[in-house]
Amino acid sequence: MNTAAFRSLFAWEWRQTGRSPLLWAVMLILAASFVWGAYNTATLHGSQTAALERARAADAAFDALTREKARAYREPVREGAGRVAYWQDPTNVAGYSEYFVKKSALKPHLPLSPLAAGVSDLAPSRLEIKLNTPFGFVDTYDFENPRGLALGRFDLAFAIVFLLPVGLLLLFALLGTFERDRDMLRLVAAQSASPRHWIAARVAAILAWSAPVVLISVVVALGVAGASIAADAAPLSAALLLTLTYMTFWTGIALVVLGAQPGAGPALGSFAAIWAALTIGLPLAGSALTSLVDPAPSAIRYVDAQRAVSDDIQSRRDEIITDAMRARPDLRSYTDRVTMLDHATRLSFLVPETERQLTPLKRDIEGHRRRQEKVARLAGFVIPPLGIESALATLAGTDPGRQRSFEDQARKYQHHLHAIVRPLVQHEITQPAPPDERATRGRLNLAQPLALPEFAMAERPVAERIGDALLFAAWLALVAGAIMALGLARIREWRVAQ
Amino acid sequence: MSALAIQSISIAFGGYRAVDGLSLTLQPGEVYALLGPNGAGKTTTLNMILGFVKPDSGSIVIDGVDAVTAPLAARARTAYLPETVMLHPSLSAIENLTYFALLAGRRIDAPMARQLLADAGLQEEAHDRRAGSFSKGMRQKVGVAIALAKDARLLLLDEPTSGLDAGAANDLSEVIRAASGRGIAVLMATHDLFRVKDVAHRLGILHAGRLVDERDAATIGPVELEQLYLQRLAA
Amino acid sequence: MIWRLTHLELAILRRDRRAWGALLALASLILLSFLAIATQNVRSDADKQAVAAAERARWVGQGEKDPHSAAHYSIFAFKPSPALAALDPGSESFVGQTVWLEAHHQNDMLYRPQQNASLLQRIGFAAPAALITGFAPLIIFLIAFTLVAQDRERGTMRVALGAAIHPRMIVGAKALTVWCASTGLLLLPVTAGSLLWLGLGGRLDGDTALRMICWALVMASYFAFLAAVGIAVSLRMANARLALTALFGLWIFFALALPRVASGMVDAARPLPSSQSVRQEIAEAAPAFWSDEQNARNRAKLLARYGVTRVEDIPNPRMAELDLVERHSHEVFDRILGGFYGRVAAQDRLFAAFGFLSPTIAAQAASASVAGSDFSHHRDFIDSAERYRRDLVNRMNADGMGHRAHGTERHTNDDKLWSQVPEFAYPTPPLGRFAGTALPAFMALLAWLAIGGLLLITAARRLRP
């Protein structure tokens, strides 16, 4: 069959496929699932964004209250309005540092976030930053119904990664096996078309209809979900390219299976087995294997270590602070004041020591997490559904990498706050002790609450995120091409003899 | 040049020799009936001619093209009508014909398709009807049209009259005669002894994969043919 | 007679490489997943026990100190994994495993096992129950298709119907075959393995055995429904392709799409407030650090409570204030956190009610409830730990209030008091105590079972040779 004949055959197949109610039923269901997935994720992210706004407002209100208190406590002591305790006093630099420095590190969603829920349902998008929390912030989370988490979210990525192949394979299996099941294949084979051309034309026709419909549906779904499509055209294009590549990957699988010219039953059976192996079997085996080879450090043991370190530090508290002060030229001569230090000032020495002692364990945990993420990234190249989900999450900004960057930045932000506030707190050690009876309600060793910088998350350039996704898309295209070539190469003869 | 030249083809499946040293030659316009009971090797022979299976030994040449080494080119010169013609039920007769012609690498327009269907004996009112509502005889006629559309040098018929009523079977005989008249060689595999006697020029009896007898159809009457057939099978 | 027929049908099934292979593959995955989770749980429970013992030792040995400082020191409570968690971990991977029982705070439970899971770990985390509820339908439908639709296509069904005295016998035998094969390979090995595992680990008490039986019954009922639907659809559809399409459609709809869709709909219908707003509400209603102005209000309340006019007349005003604030916080926690958890339970109830739309949802909700791994059971642990915390803090405060201390004076106590606080122990609630949340799921499962039976009977009645 020459090119022109193939083109004619393809055109015929394309027209006939377009008339198939099954095609449009599957496309409609897929489009609906895309819209629901994007909307569902947008709803989650909308509520998270609202929570971030509330946190921002709460921080501002807390700052305003702190300033108001600082003003009020400048007043002289009078009947019914006595001196305030240091932990209630924002004009006391030590009290301020521990009880009034409370900031939020917020991770805003990117415009294309409805594309994939990623880790956004599991990892916190707000971290409370206080000066004396070891390692930046408490390992907390935003509560989502655990049943829903265990089940997995119906997001657009789920629809693309899991449902789209099912829909496509259903089409390939039912539209590509019709002649076999209807006993027409001998008559088809008796014409002069090669099985390769015949199957290729049919499969190409299905892809030619489904690809544009799927891509348009993805755009519509994101539009319905309120994603700013025009503003984020580049990552959106990358997402569409990924989706298209993913479709060609499954088309390759279809070619391999349909090359054997099976009936619908065996074809669907094979497709279901391959689909289940790629989406469940391999991830399950991969996850079990990585857990076996590189088991996670026990969080429970970390609790134990935290308690043991805390006990140790409390038992050697003054000794640790004395050592720390001796190491500081500006504080060296004031070690006799160690026992008189307040809790907040003590913490400015003890928390670094807590961190120092827990660092090996923390490093183990972090190291394990990073290794696992790296393994998952690499596994994505072997298990396409995993890779595509990861790439979509990267484009959506809900990937573990961005979360990790957020946490790292939050930690750096805490360091930045340390650099501003701790010197002031520790400098107070060198100052003469306040009189027992002071005239004002507040201590007034901090004239005004500090104008501390707000956390602002620095983002990776969009081009980098797109680059990551395109790297995977290029790999997947290569794999898809190889599978297609393999599939086509295996179609040599009509299997109609018996 | 012969329309079909088969030289000593043999094929075995497992230890069973389905066709054993079969040789056969058909000249253009010749109608050859390959007779034999179920399992004699008739369909396997057709499968080898169509290139669906390769013979273990021997050669098959169709209109000068080696069907073993170039099955696609050979198939382009061959038309085939299976025992039961199944069509796309959602397509009309014309659409079905157009589709199969496309598979054969030919583009036919609607008037040509109508002419072919008419030549095959399908009533005009059925041309635009969906094939899902067709009887077996009507489907068979569309199958004949598909074969005619191919403009082949060799027509292979697999049990062509099986399940057809007398009228439809007669129509088919007419089509075969017409094809023969146009110089198309026809090889039909069948066990319908009486009808083939009317249309075939030569008859061959296949038993256990071997061609056990071959006669000129004009030289044998229906009763003798049946006796010969039973005799050969019993041997 | 029907058993002999079933025996023969099983032989046909065993000789179908594709169907039997698929069954074995899923059975292997289920066992692999069971072993992986069970091993992990054993390791994690051992850690929890060891650290809980260390915590107790630290509590008792914390030395002499102010009882309120002891209440702040307190302990970490650890949640043991439910006995059937290796079969159905339910919510377990996404709820915290430990909580610090500290004065003034009802802390969140921390360290969710999947908190920092990579994408591979999250996608690859498939428990036996999830594999069974999600993928058994596919396999069961495939087997039913193999036994019925292909039989019809080949014409062997016609021959069988012609020979049979009553078609019901054939239909019954086929349904029984599908059920026996799926139950025998997908359910029995993992149930037996779990019994063995629990027995060897010394965790197989009466309640656990009962839970195990109920779990197996839930899944067996689910399989029975699936077998009935698979057979009925394969019998009723015009041809094998339609039957296959319908069965695949049902699998996608029931098992793949609807559970997640329903979960999203539940979120939309009964949204939960964000953790941030819950924490903020608590912080405003019961601040852990109160301002000077709040101090003044607290003092006024204390004077009224003690019926005195001077703070000096209260034996230990500091502890009395701490106790006042603590008890106020209990009411706040009950109202805000209790309300929040109530909303989570309401979500779960609504999700279970979606079981009337999908048997997979019914099986999922019922399985987690029976396994003791749904949120209702987790809430029981939260409440139990919180009761313990309140008791501990109240005891400490009571001891402080019972001893006079003013100004910078501090009453202290030692291990005599600390050891009076009983060790934290979480008794696993008996089966059925928290079944209310999943009640709609159990009812739905029964309804699906009845529907399956009706479908089968109807299909058998309409069957003609």
Image (cartoon, coloured by chain):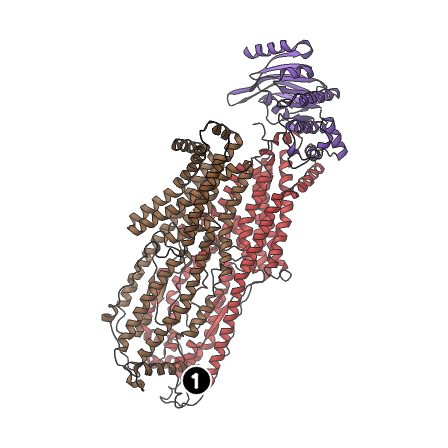
**Eyeballing the image, is C52 above or below C284?**
above
Q: Nearer the viewer, residue A406 or A176?
A: A176
Residue A415: horizontal and vertical position, in percent? Answer: 46, 71
Residue A426 visible in rendering: no
Residue B132 visible in rendering: yes
Q: Residue at x 28, y 79 (%)?
A: C410
Give the colour chain C carries in the figure. Answer: brown
Q: Which chain is purple?
A: B
Give the colour chain A carries in the figure. Answer: red
In the displayed structure image, the side of residue A194 where residue C91 appears, left or right = left
| View extreme (right): residue | B111
**Eyeballing the image, is A199 above or below A344?**
above
**Eyeballing the image, is A132 above or below C303?**
above
- Count of picture labels: 1
| View extreme (left): residue | C416
Which three-letter amino acid code belongs to the residue tagged 1? Asn
In the displayed structure image, the side of residue A180 where residue A411 appears, left or right = left
Residue A428: which quarter of the image? bottom left
Q: Label 1 marks which chain's residue?
A: A
Residue A261: which quarter of the image? top right
Q: Quadrant of the N terminus of chain C?
A: top left
Residue under circle 1?
Answer: A445
Q: Nearer the viewer, residue B168 or C425?
A: B168
Residue A254: horizontal and vertical position, in percent? Answer: 57, 41
